Amino acid sequence: MNLFKSSFLFLVPFYLCQINLGLAQSTGMSGYITGDKVNMRTDHTTQASAVMLLKKGQSIRILKSYRPDDNSNEAILRTSTDFYNEDYGQKVFTLPKGKAVLVKGRPGDQCAISFRNETTGKVGYAKIQTHLLEFIGGDTWYYIETEGRKGWVFGKYVSYN
């Protein structure tokens, strides 16, 4: 149940239109962060800049919510994943569980992804088994306030009272 979503029906000549509005109501609902090292971002996308890193159990105040279309190419890793050099079989790097990635093209058994290296800020590319990804299109984001700062957090990492 999304407490922040409303749906209105309007009759227009020859059409029945439904308009969904993500209401930006100040709720003052309290909650907490359920994951560790969760990014609070400047916008409701994994590609937005991180404002701060949140800790598991950190108290928050939920200000509003947003639910994007299901057509997003955003995903997060289900598990920490090692990547190897194809020619030499040497481990090159590891992406941690929960890392946000963009899926390039149509996923099959494998898909191409891009991701931002948090240390260097550079974008990297890799191929990954699709079953290792959790696609997050259509999932709720929450605009929150904590420690005097405001930003967006992916709903998977928020629990509210």
Image (cartoon, rainbow, N blue to C red):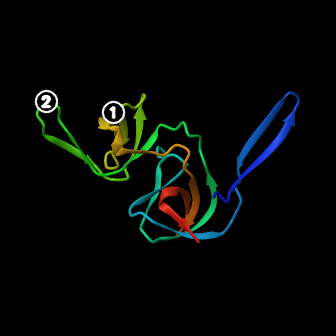
Label 1, secondary structure: give it.
loop
Q: Nearer the viewer, residue 149 or 82?
A: 82
Left or right: 8 as drawn, with respect to 132: right
* Picture layout, residue 87 above or below residue 138: above
> Where residue 13 sits in the image (x, y, percent)?
88, 29
Q: Quadrant of residue 2?
A: bottom right
Left or right: 16 as drawn, with respect to 61: right
Residue at image point 37% right, 41% down: 115
Q: Nearer the viewer, residue 11 or 158?
A: 11
* Picture layout, residue 14 above or below residue 21: above
Label 2, secondary structure: give it.
loop
> Where residue 9 sits in the image (x, y, percent)?
81, 43
Q: Amino acid at mark 1?
A: Asp
Left or right: 7 as drawn, with respect to 73: right
| Among numbered discs 1 and 2, the one appearing first in the sequence | 2
Residue at image point 72% right, 45% down: 20
Q: Quadrant of residue 107?
A: top left
Left or right: 34 as drawn, with respect to 5: left
Q: Amino acid at mark 2?
A: Asp
Q: Quadrant of the C terminus?
A: bottom right
> Where residue 75 sits in the image (x, y, percent)?
43, 43
As measured in the structure, the alpha-carbon distance from the residue carrying label 1 to the one carrying label 2 is 21 Å
> Where residue 156 sits in the image (x, y, percent)?
49, 57
Mark 2: give few (<14), some (14-19) or many (20+) Cα within 10 Å: few
Would residue 154 be seen by someone viewing this image from the given angle? no
Residue carrying label 2: 87
Q: Nearer the viewer, residue 129 or 157?
A: 129
Which label sits on residue 109? 1
